[in-house]
Amino acid sequence: MNWQALLLTLKLAAVVSVLLLFIGAPIAYWIAFSRARWKFLVESVVALPLVLPPTVIGFYALLAFGPNTGLGRFLTRIFGHGLAFTFEGLAIASVLYSLPFAVQPFAAGFASVDPAFVNAAASLGAGRWRRFWRIVLPLSSSAVLTGFVLSFAHTVGEFGVVLMVGGNIPGVTRTVSVDIYDRVEAFDFAGANRTSVLLLCFSFVILAVMYGATKRAWRMGRQH
């Protein structure tokens, strides 16, 4: 078992999930409550990673991180180095790839909040962001948990984006999925099987805990 790859994978998943909480929540809030006619275009852009091959996302992320683009030069100034084949670049690309797995549950949860609570807070002078933090977010905690866990689990299982943007650098970008691929290429099927079983069990436990917590929160909400 490649524990270095496992720890790197968990680190990547944690970073991506936390970033998506702060990036995905405002997007989901806008999607849930906006009445703009062109809202469907934003929803389509957010959902693109669900239908695009991960290699396409990885390819364009790799081009965007390059020194020949304005974004690439801007990111290089911020981080002090190019982002291709680095953990930072891998994290940014993973945020893009897992965006719908966070935004869609968030938006569904926000939209399910009773508008009467939001309107009552607005009538008392609460601003938009205060209504979000004090009313919408607490009442949709199960949806937020779902989005967080799904984005975490999705990042753990990434392969195409990881290989395109991060490559296969031990201790830097070699994740569990890439390690399994390497073992299969080396005909180490026993090692690949051990790692795959561990990843399978880990993913099952995460999803079981998420669905159990969500169901419990839903029951408690109905009781109240």
Image (tube, rainbow, N blue to C red):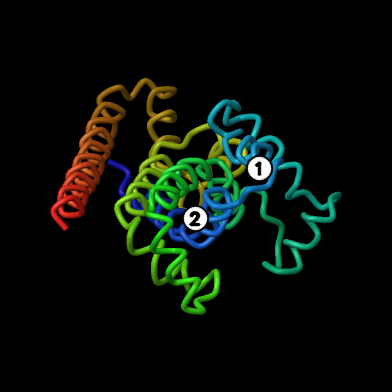
Query: What amino acid is at disc 1?
Result: Lys
Residue 202, position as x, y percentages in the image: 24, 41
- Give the secondary structure at mark 2: helix
Give the number of the mark in front: 2 or 1. 1
Residue 96, position as x, y percentages in the image: 58, 45
What residue is rendered at 23% in x and 47% in y? Answer: 214
Q: Taking 23 as reference, is 51 above or below it? A: above
Badge 1: residue crowd in 10 Å (few <14, some 14–19, many ≥20): few
Q: Quadrant of the C terminus?
A: bottom left
Q: Earlier in the sequence, mark 2 or mark 1?
A: 2
In the depicted view, which residue is nearer to us: 125 or 64? 125
What residue is rendered at 20% in x and 36% in y? Answer: 201
Between the C-alphas of marks 2 and 1, the distance is 20 Å
In the depicted view, which residue is nearer to us: 142 or 113? 113
Q: Which mark is residue 39?
A: 1
Q: Quadrant of the N terminus?
A: top left
What residue is rendered at 49% in x and 47% in y? Answer: 103
Badge 2: residue crowd in 10 Å (few <14, some 14–19, many ≥20): many
- Give the secondary structure at mark 1: helix
Q: What residue is disc 2 on?
A: 20
Q: Residue furthest bottom?
A: 125
What residue is rendered at 18% in x and 50% in y? Answer: 222
Left or right placement of residue 97 versus residue 102 in this view: right
Q: Quadrant of residue 37?
A: top right
Q: Taking 208 as reference, is 16 above or below it? A: below
Query: What amino acid is at disc 2?
Result: Leu
Number of residue marks: 2
Residue 75, position as x, y percentages in the image: 73, 61
